[in-house]
Image (cartoon, rainbow, N blue to C red):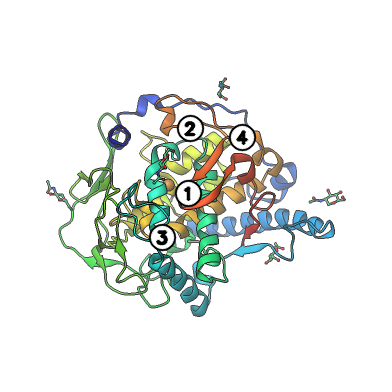
Amino acid sequence: MRLIKSVALGLLAGTLSNALPAPQDPTTTVSSEASSTLPATASSDTAVASDQLDQLATYAQEQANATLQNDSKKRSECNIFNVAVRREWGSLSNKERKAYTDAVLCLQAKQAKTPSSIVPGAKSRFDDWVATHINQTMTIHYTGTFLAWHRYFTWQYEQALRNECGYQGYQPYWNWANTAATSLESSAMLDGSAYSMTGNGAYIPGQGNVILGGNGLPEIPIPPGNGGGCVTSGPFKNMKVNLGPVALGTTNGTTISNGDGLSYNPRCLKRDLTDYTNKRFANATSIVKNILGTHDVYDFQMTMQGYPGSGDIGVHGGGHYSMGGDPGRDLFVSPGDPLFYLHHGMIDRTWWIWQLLDEKTRTGAKGISGTGTFLDSPPSANTTLDTPIDLGYAAGPPATMRDLMSTTDGPMCYIYL
Ligand SMILES: *[C@@H]1O[C@H](CO)[C@@H](O)[C@H](O)[C@H]1NC(C)=O
Ligand SMILES: *[C@@H]1O[C@H](CO)[C@@H](O)[C@H](O)[C@H]1NC(C)=O
Ligand SMILES: *[C@@H]1O[C@H](CO)[C@@H](O)[C@H](O)[C@H]1NC(C)=O
Ligand SMILES: *[C@@H]1O[C@H](CO)[C@@H](O)[C@H](O)[C@H]1NC(C)=O
Ligand SMILES: *[C@@H]1O[C@H](CO)[C@@H](O)[C@H](O)[C@H]1NC(C)=O
Ligand SMILES: *[C@@H]1O[C@H](CO)[C@@H](O)[C@H](O)[C@H]1NC(C)=O
Ligand SMILES: [Cu+2]
């Protein structure tokens, strides 16, 4: 673990940039049907791009539904009558919102499955997910497994909410385009009400920038938001973050950690909602560009996470850093903020839309690129359809990449509205 951590801190400082592998996979293209009916490039006007995103999502639904309708005739296990539909937070009723946060609180009140001899700080079922993510951070980001691993992780979390906490809905998502157009704090998701995901942290004046990159790569200064302290209202006002930090970016430009992050370190949930980051890196244009402007899965997933040295942190980084706070700015411990799962719902939705523009190619072997280690450092084997994805104590059984390439043609059965 010590070795792993020093590698991660090295990466945050930019020292692994020379390990960046070159683009690999053969180019895949949007199917001819899609290219004749859909916009070809992202509009730089975010209002227009937001409509383009809706159009792309509708196209993806049409593709998915056509197959599900066929499957209904064949009485397949996953069909149009039983498919789960994941929706955006803002489109849920107050009752549905509260059912979701109640289920998360339930998970936080249930005993952990992770043995305390292995992770002393894992106190709840919710923490099982955080511990698994900390443990595997260096083998699930900038890897060939990034998209599928987080898809499975989010799906198993949704299953736990349903099967262990009686939740009857599905995993909601955060459409970054919407909060970029307005502001984070004015959204139903983050307004701090009883029907939100809890809002901002208490305002801490005089905070400096969080510095990403550097050390040979261009620095990416992320300005502080208008919070920074403990959250003050809403469902997660009293929750405890038990694990970490491991690599927490602070607003004085440093990174702090508490060893391997696995010991018991209870503290409040902090947020520092940062509109700048949302608007700059995860606006509607960024999302549509990520979908339409990338020609293969290598380009797609690197754009999403940010090409090191490009100065861009992608929509993945954009979402994470616009939450800010602790553990929101910690690559390892980030699932310790319940908002993580709404963010990764949107990551998965973006991938889902992109896949359905050319489903056959993008859900098969050509839809995978990369290896099993962070920017292939240290070098490791290529990820393939047979690569296993194991969520440790959080949830079983292990799946393979093959199981996770489609959201409707494997163990999972869901689409996005
Ligand atoms: C791994 O993938 C790269 C790029 O697709 C390819 O050039 C290389 O031969 C693969 N390595 C193995 C061992 O299959
Ligand atoms: C696809 O099916 C879902 C579930 O029945 C439905 O909610 C959605 O509106 C459909 N989308 C389209 C574009 O038909
Ligand atoms: C639906 O089934 C028909 C007949 O088997 C087939 O021709 C068609 O391609 C299928 N469509 C989809 C979207 O799977
Ligand atoms: C930076 O902030 C962290 C916590 O926010 C603090 O622990 C650390 O001492 C600060 N470092 C400096 C140099 O001010
Ligand atoms: C929106 O995203 C695009 C593409 O990522 C970027 O070029 C643009 O600067 C962003 N808009 C703002 C206001 O930062
Ligand atoms: C961490 O990963 C290792 C190796 O994959 C595994 O043996 C161990 O049980 C994991 N620990 C936790 C807490 O998941
Ligand atoms: Cu992650």
* Element class at badge 1: helix
3D distance between C-alphas at marks 4 and 1: 32 Å
Disc 3 marks a residue whose amino acid type is: Phe
Earlier in the chain: of badge 1 and badge 2, it is 1
State the mark number for residue 311: none
Disc 4 marks a residue whose amino acid type is: Asp
Disc 1 marks a residue whose amino acid type is: Ser
Please identify, in this view, whether the residue under mark 3 or under mark 1 is nearer the observer.
Answer: 3
Q: Residue at x 38, y 51 (%)?
A: 115
Give left or right: position of 283 versus 201: right
Q: Residue at x 52, y 27 (%)?
A: 23
Marks 2 & 3, CB-CB < 8 Å contact:
no
3D distance between C-alphas at marks 2 and 4: 12 Å
Q: Residue at x 59, y 28 (%)?
A: 25
* Element class at badge 2: loop
3D distance between C-alphas at marks 1 and 2: 27 Å
State the mark number for residue 372: 2
Q: Position of residue 92 (x, y in %)?
A: 53, 73
Task: Name the residue beneath numbered marker 4.
Answer: 386
Earlier in the chain: of badge 3 and badge 4, it is 3
Q: Residue at x 74, y 62 (%)?
A: 80
Is the residue marked 1 within 8 Å of ligand 5, measured from its CB? yes
Task: Name the residue beneath numbered marker 3.
Answer: 126
3D distance between C-alphas at marks 3 and 1: 31 Å
Task: Name the residue beneath numbered marker 1.
Answer: 286
- 10 Å crowding of disc 3: few (<14), some (14-19), many (20+): many
